[in-house]
Amino acid sequence: MKCLAYKARNKGSLLGFADLEMKGGLILCDCTVHESRGTRWVSPPGKPMIGADGAAIRKDGKTAYAPVVRFASKEVRDLWSNAAVRAIAAFLGQAPSP
């Protein structure tokens, strides 16, 4: 996996957004990068959930998002997230911590 671009956006656990290229050439744009309680993870892009009235659905004052990409298991998702964290760290010239 390779990070092609990164946009910082510090808000709550959100650190920023990354464009990630998979080995087969698939590029996922705007993957979210998070950190909380010493753990960093990456999530694939999502889309805002839209209600019957055409407005974004909100939960606890925040826009609710639905997944665009799913993983076969938590283990596969964790492997992907860990690889994404490493790719982003390499792109930014940082150690892949935490």
Image: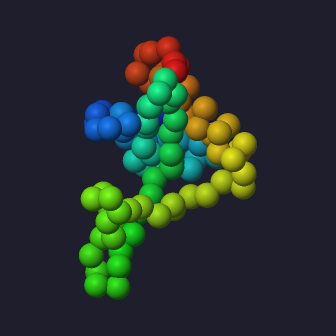
x then y, percent, for residue 93: 43, 16
What kind of colouring is applied to the model shown? Answer: rainbow
Is there any visible trace of residue 7 in the rendered image? no
Direction from residue 55 to residue 79 in the image, left or right: right
Q: In this view, does 69 lie above or below 6?
A: below
Q: Residue farthest to the front? A: 60
Q: Where is residue 57 in the image (x, y as percent from the top left)?
A: 33, 70
- The residue that appears at 28% across and 38% down in the rendered structure is 11
> Does any portion of residue 75 appear in the rendered image?
yes
Residue 98 left/right relative to 52: right
Residue positioned 47% across, 64% down in the render: 66
Q: Where is residue 94 in the image (x, y as percent from the top left)?
A: 45, 15
Camera-side residue: 43 or 25? 43
Farthest residue toward the bottom?
Answer: 52
On the image, which quarter does residue 58 sit in?
bottom left
Residue located 50% across and 45% down the image: 43
Q: Residue at x 58, y 46 (%)?
A: 25
Q: Position of residue 60 (x, y in %)?
A: 32, 59
Q: Quadrant of residue 84?
A: top right
51, above or below 64, in the image: below
